Amino acid sequence: INAEYMGAQELGIQDSVTLERDISFQRKMDLLRQASIGLHTMVNEHFGISVVEFMAAGAVVVAHNSAGPKMDIVRPPLELKGPFNGEAVGLLATTEEEYALALNKVLKLPPVLQDLIRENARTSCARFSAASFQQAFGALLSRLMP
């Protein structure tokens, strides 16, 4: 964590950065409730449960444009340079420049549009619930066992 914090010092933002690790579940929930943006940078993550947690907590997601977040979670994404898509649930980025553009776009959106993205994202999370899984699994089984 010290090396990461040193990067914040080099940028002069150390007073605005807090890095925590091995936090309790309760602490994680407290932080998620306060978050306005959920930043996810892992490349080729197979699913991305943290992205779903961000969405469920109401943070606008900026995730890596690969694997699970791209294919399964952040759909449809808000375009980095294009107009607002009223159904967007977050943004995808690959390069440092794209991440910067995405963060800038979220921060410049009017609060009413940020809230729309948050609501879309929360609604989208329902497809990852236990009930949704049970229903889909049951439907699959019923097709296999007439």
Image (cartoon, rainbow, N blue to C red):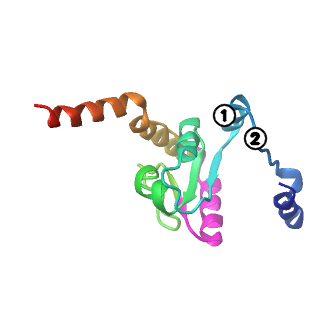
Q: Is residue 99 magenta?
A: yes
Give the vertical position of 52 relative to 95 (above or below).
Answer: above
The image shows residue 136 at horizontal and vertical percentages of 29, 35
The tag on residue 22 is 2
Residue furthest to the front: 145
Circle 2: residue type: Asp
Q: Quadrant of residue 141?
A: top left
Q: Image point 22% across, 37% down: which residue? A: 140
- x and y percentages locating residue 125 in the rendered image: 45, 38
| Quadrant occupied by the C terminus | top left
Quarter of the figure that contains the N terminus = bottom right
* Res 96 seen here: yes
* Magenta-highlighted residues: 92-112
N-term-proximal mark, 1 vs 2: 2
Would you call the spot at circle 1 few (<14 residues within 10 Å), some (14-19), or many (20 or more)? some
**In the rendered image, is residue 84 in sight?**
no
Verify whether residue 130 appears in magenta: no
Left or right of 77, for residue 17: right
Work out whether residue 83 or residue 89 is closer to the camera in this orientation and state it. Answer: 89
| Position of residue 13 in the picture relative to residue 142 (left or right) | right
Identify the secondary structure beneath mark 1: helix
**Mark 1 — residue?**
33
Instruction: Name the amino acid type tagged 1.
Output: Arg
Residue at x 75%, y 37% (from the top left corner): 23
Q: Main secondary structure of the magenta part?
A: helix
